[in-house]
Amino acid sequence: MKKLTAAALAILFLFPLLWSAWASFRTPTGFGLENYSRLFTSDNGIRFEHVFNSVAVSVLTVGGTLVVATLGGYAFGRFQFPGKNALFLLTLAILMVPYATILIALYVLLGWIGLEDSLVGLSAVLIMFQLPFSIFMMRNSFEAIPKELEEQALIDGCSSFGILTRVMLHAVRPGLVTVGLFAFLTSWSEFFAPLILLNSTDKFTMMLAVVNMRTASFGAIDYAALEAGVTFMAVPCLLLFLFLQRSYVRGFMSGALRG
């Protein structure tokens, strides 16, 4: 019964993606790559700079999230300092704020510091919204490590930073994979933040480029090319998830469900 239920749920969730993939190859005369050709050659389609922008934003977001979340999670998980619990709760409280309500304020703030209409500024905003969940995951991942491992490293002469880089990072690898995967999926598929924070068309991500295809000539919408764009953007996400699935599940189970 459990296997049947799992199979039914899998089909339910996979059906929209499979339908989009099927529709992306369907043409008036059969099946082919005509829709993908229009996706990359039409005036409103995806261009090289859109792919580059999406990759750049994703790399910056994943890298920044991993660095800050690892240091923050290590501090919250292994050190005692005044106001630790209050600061941790304040960090988690960001989850209760709908990010769409503060994007205009963030746009103004980015203008003050000279990062308006930039991929770096967009990445910084996406990192900020990833930190509550990411720090929570990394704190629990560090807390799951036996203290004896850390004490042995101290006896061997490692500093706190040395323990983190030489010992802890290897032990919390599943947590790192989980945090990095969530950060990638969010930054790769984000639409609302780039729509508000980016003004120049040459800075647009692939998500904005695909949405812009809805404003084709004479108001006609090329749904087949749109399906091709959806499928094209979904492929990296599927490949990453399949490749990192085992580490992702281990990290999520040992991190999020602990504490």
Image (cartoon, rainbow, N blue to C red):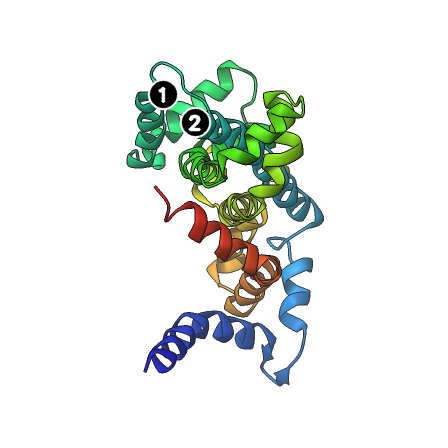
Q: Residue at x 49, y 33 (%)?
A: 147
The amino acid sitting under disc 1 is Lys
Q: Position of residue 190 (x, y in %)?
A: 48, 45
**Mark 2 residue element:** helix
Q: Is residue 34 left or right of residue 17?
A: right
Q: Position of residue 37 (x, y in %)?
A: 68, 66
Q: Is residue 130 left or right of residue 158?
A: left
Instruction: Pick the residue in front: 5 or 130.
Output: 5
Q: Residue at x 51, y 48 (%)?
A: 178
Instruction: Pick the residue in front: 197 or 167.
Output: 167
Instruction: Pick the residue in front: 144 or 55.
Output: 144
> As drawn, which residue projects farthest toward the bottom?
30
Task: Give the labeled residue for mark 2.
Answer: 76
Q: Is residue 231 left or right of residue 19?
A: right
Q: Position of residue 239 (x, y in %)?
A: 62, 62
Q: Residue at x 41, y 39 (%)?
A: 133
Task: Give the labeled residue for mark 1.
Answer: 84
Residue 203's place in the image compared with 215, above or below, is above
Tell which circle, 2 or 1, labels the residue nearer the N-terminal end.
Answer: 2
Q: Position of residue 16 (x, y in %)?
A: 44, 71
The amino acid sitting under disc 2 is Phe
Tell me the quarter of the image containing the C terminus.
top left
Tell me the quarter of the image containing the N terminus.
bottom left
Task: Answer yes or no: is residue 114 visible.
Answer: yes
Residue 99's place in the image compared with 17, above or below, is above
**Mark 1 residue element:** helix
Instruction: Pick the residue in front: 155 or 232.
Output: 155
Q: Residue at x 55, y 44 (%)?
A: 180
Tag count:
2
Look at the numbered discs 2 and 1 and tell me whether their residues touch, using CB distance below 8 Å.
yes
Q: Which mark is residue 233?
A: none
